[in-house]
Image (cartoon, rainbow, N blue to C red):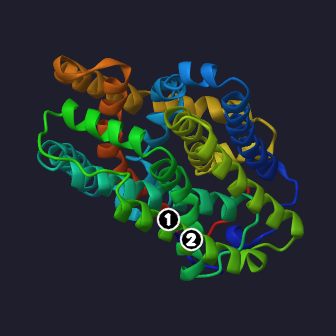
Amino acid sequence: MVTTRSSAPSARRTPDGGPFDRLARTVATTGWIAVAAAVAVAVVAPDAAAAAMFVPLLIGIVLFGLPHGALDHVVPARVGFAWGRTPVGVTVFLGAYLALAVATLAAWTVAPAATFAAFLVATVAHWGQGDLRFLQLHLGRRALGLADALATGGLRGALPVALPVLAYPDVVASLMGHAATAVGAGGALPDPAAAPVQLATAAFLAVAGAGWVATLRRAWATRAGVTLDVAEVALLVATFLLVPPYLAIGVYFLFWHALRHLVRLLVLRPRERRDVAQGRTVRGWGRLARDLVPMTVLAILVLVGLWAWAAPRLDGVEGYVATYLVWISALTMPHMAVVAAMDVAPDAARPVRA
């Protein structure tokens, strides 16, 4: 799920208030404010939260959702894999990437229940990996080994997935049904409210949570770090228990997960690291945005094609969102492999410095 190399300088250092740490704090704070605002709206104005529940997801298609994976084709080269700089290596990589995406789309049409379950498991692993690695690279959390990585990453990734299954199984069932209908798949679908599903989900959260608590103090050099970790987990729990699921996932995906990955992409190249170090962060973001445009546009065009193909079967906005989920799942499978490779790449242990 995540790298466990405790020797990595970037994974063990304490934030020193420099430009990279300020950038990371800004990105993290953006996520905190966004999910806290969603919780506040859901509690104070539940009707408004229900009316706007699809907005972040739909905005996120263009803003951060699809773009955050739009550099996957150049990531291997930028993190130090020599094969990522050769025509043969890039061709093989792109072929494998596309093959896995197409295979996932095909799997939806023949086995939607199994594919949906596999996507949820992959999402737990990917979101947990991304969150934990961001804490290690940018906020000073220590890498303590495999057990801690599985527990902490598992908990961080499971909160956005498992809590809706426990608290809103009817919404999860509806999403699964809309996704199966969108791809024209038939057959019975499992019930997320069934006792075995609920018990297994709760047990996973309990085990991961216990492992996270057991290593919490050793994972941070300061009490402030412990407080930050606990506060983030508490905020995520509140978000996915109190906010309507589509709104919660949309805000989290847009302002938390995708944005944290984008800041990792921003500091991959020396030129962008120099910009950040010299206070020219806006210029670095501008170049990154320019780099993201081509593949984002291509991904959006494919999504529009999927919508057009599925349109006769779609029922309302939820149907279109479910089709987006199908496309996101197809991209997530190869994307999570790319992100995992980032953590074991030759340059993965490089401190985030100019």
- Please name the amino acid that badge 2 sits on: Ala
Q: Is residue 35 above or below residue 345?
A: above
Q: Secondary structure at mark 1?
A: helix
Q: Is residue 207 above or below residue 331?
A: below
Residue in the picture at 33% in, 45% down: 329
Residue in the picture at 58% in, 45% down: 240
Work out which quarter of the rendered image holds the C terminus and state it.
bottom right
* Foreground pick, 38 / 2: 38
Residue in the picture at 44% in, 42% down: 69
Horizontal and vertical percent position of residue 167 = 51, 48
Horizontal and vertical percent position of residue 54 = 49, 25
Residue 173 left/right relative to 290: left
Q: Is residue 310 at least partly visible in the picture?
A: yes
Horizontal and vertical percent position of residue 75 = 45, 51
Horizontal and vertical percent position of residue 120 = 38, 54
Quote the CA–CA distance across marks 1 and 2. Answer: 6 Å
Q: Secondary structure at mark 2?
A: helix
Total numbered circles: 2
List the residue tagged with mark 1.
Answer: 202
Q: Residue furthest front?
A: 195
List the residue tagged with mark 2.
Answer: 206
Would you call the spot at circle 1 few (<14 residues within 10 Å), some (14-19), or many (20 or more)? some
Residue 274 left/right relative to 264: right
- Please name the amino acid that badge 1 sits on: Ala
Q: Is residue 347 at least partly visible in the picture?
A: no
| Proximity of marks 1 and 2: CB atoms separated by less than 8 Å | yes
Would you call the spot at circle 2 few (<14 residues within 10 Å), some (14-19), or many (20 or more)? some
Q: Is residue 72 above or below residue 226?
A: above
Q: Is residue 208 above or below residue 43?
A: below
Residue in the picture at 88% in, 69% down: 223
* Foreground pick, 213 / 292: 213
